[in-house]
Structures are given as structure tokens and as C-alpha cells.
Image (cartoon, rainbow, N blue to C red):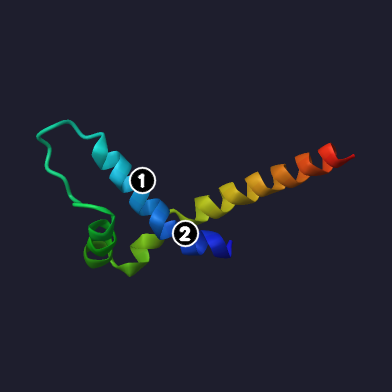
């Protein structure tokens, strides 16, 4: 969970940039790049907004880790 807490802001920025990249031509962009994205989110939505979606990310990674551990144990036998 600690790694997710550290990585969540970058994941949020990545998702927002990907979503913005799918906008049709002529639609104004909100961000000029990753660094601008971090600062814009923090300035407009508050610093805590960089951890939006933290709960689902922790849950998803817990499930993935449990599945990897179970499958690794099966392969080792």
C-alpha cells in the first residue's frame, strides 16, 4: 500500500493526460504536460486531489498480489 500511496499522483496524471489525448481536435486542452498537470490539480482541486482513487488502487493491487502469490505457490509445487 505504501508504494501505491507514492505512485497514485503519477497514475492520476497519466490517466488525465491519456483522457485529454483522446479529445477531438479543436477542443481546448487543460494541461500542457505532466508537470503542468500536477500543479493544476493541486492548485485547482487541492493537494489531496492527487490521491483521488487511492482506495480502488489499493484494493486492485491487493487482489493482484494475492493472485500472484497463490499462482506462484501452485507453480512451485
Residue 38 falls in image quadrant: bottom left
The location of residue 27, given as percent across then percent down, is 12, 37
Mark 2, residues whose alpha carbon is within 10 Å: few (<14), some, or many (≥20)? some
* Image-based side of 71 in relation to 32, left or right: right
Residue 71 in sight from this viewpoint = yes
Quadrant in which the C terminus appears: top right
Q: Secondary structure at mark 1?
A: helix
Q: In the displayed structure, would residue 18 be above or below residue 5?
A: above
Q: Do the numbered discs 2 and 1 sit on residues whose CB atoms are within 8 Å?
A: no
* Image-based side of 43 in relation to 52, left or right: left
Which mark identifies residue 67? none
Q: Nearer the viewer, residue 6 or 51?
A: 6
Residue 52 in sight from this viewpoint = no
* Image-based side of 29 in relation to 76, left or right: left
- The residue at 21%/35% (across/down) is 23
- The residue at 27%/60% (across/down) is 35
Which mark identifies residue 15? 1
Residue 20 falls in image quadrant: top left
Q: CA distance from mark 2 to mark 1?
A: 13 Å
The location of residue 43, given as percent across then percent down, is 22, 67
- The residue at 48%/64% (across/down) is 6
* Image-based side of 28 in relation to 7, left or right: left
Quadrant in which the N terminus appears: bottom right
Residue at the disc numbered 2: 7
Residue 70 falls in image quadrant: top right
Q: In the displayed structure, would residue 59 be above or below residue 76?
A: below
Q: In the displayed structure, would residue 71 be above or below residue 55?
A: above
Mark 1, residues whose alpha carbon is within 10 Å: few (<14), some, or many (≥20)? few
Q: Secondary structure at mark 2?
A: helix
Q: Earlier in the sequence, mark 2 or mark 1?
A: 2
The location of residue 52, given as percent across then percent down, is 40, 57
- The residue at 41%/52% (across/down) is 11
Amino acid at each position: 500500500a505504501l508504494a501505491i500511496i507514492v505512485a497514485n499522483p503519477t497514475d492520476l496524471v497519466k490517466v488525465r493526460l491519456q483522457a485529454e489525448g483522446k479529445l477531438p481536435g479543436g477542443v481546448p486542452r487543460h494541461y500542457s504536460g505532466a508537470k503542468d498537470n500536477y500543479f493544476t490539480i493541486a492548485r485547482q482541486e487541492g493537494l489531496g486531489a492527487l490521491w483521488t482513487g487511492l482506495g480502488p488502487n489499493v484494493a486492485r493491487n491487493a487482489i493482484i498480489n494475492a493472485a500472484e502469490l497463490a499462482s506462484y505457490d501452485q507453480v512451485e509445487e
